Image (tube, rainbow, N blue to C red):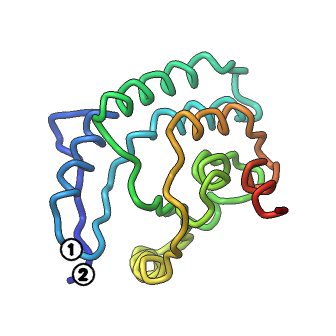
Amino acid sequence: MNVALVRPDDKEEGLEAAAGALRRAAGISSPYVLVAADPLAAVAAEWEAMWQVGAEPRGADAFELRAGEALSAWRANRFELPDYYLVVAEEAARDESHPDFYLGPLRSVRPHRVAAVAAAEPAERAAAVLSALGSLRHGRWWPSLEEVVTTARGFYPGALAESPVAIATELR
């Protein structure tokens, strides 16, 4: 009863569908609103594709194109980042060798704003999501999307999951 789910409109695709779903979610008064769309999905996919071992080598051109599109939409106030990112995947899909935009560069800029849930079975997954929702920690709000993209540009999969800024802040 405390969780509402917002799916993207079938008439829209990609960034526009995610932006529309986030706008609709903003008007819901439920304590938790899960949005099954992400305005950074194309950025994440291209970032991860740059690091795929064994695939045809890819440069950063596609990542930069998608990042530019997302930045333009964000600057035009077509979307804001959600309060939290809840990454849901099968346990086998999340290992150290798989580059993950959400658990890598995005989590490094705000560790408390990205939570991961790993469960194979639908019932386990639903229980894990509810548990994760109840244990979300407070933390600073997202930095600008420019900072997120800059972090992604310099983030190497397998590196520490903390940004240089976060590490410097903790050392003070």
Contact between labelled residues 2 and 1, with CB atoms less than 8 Å apart: yes
Q: Is residue 68 left or right of residue 164?
A: left
Q: Is residue 37 left or right of residue 11?
A: right
Which residue corresponds to mark 1? 30
Comparing 1 with 170, the one in front is 170
Task: Name the residue located 39 percent from the left edge and 24 percent from the top edge.
Answer: 72
Comparing 58 with 106, the one in front is 106
- Figure check: 165 above or below 151: below
Q: Position of residue 68 (x, y in %)?
A: 48, 22
Quadrant in the picture for residue 62? top right
Task: Name the residue located 77 percent from the left edge and 50 percent from the top edge.
Answer: 97
Residue type for callout 1: Ser
In the rendered image, the quadrant that contains the C terminus is: bottom right
Residue type for callout 2: Asn
Q: CA distance from mark 1 to mark 2?
A: 6 Å
Q: SS for tag 1?
A: loop
In the rendered image, the quadrant that contains the N terminus is: bottom left
Q: Position of residue 131 (x, y in %)?
A: 46, 83
Q: Position of residue 38 (x, y in %)?
A: 38, 46
Quadrant in the picture for residue 74? top left
Which residue corresponds to mark 2? 2
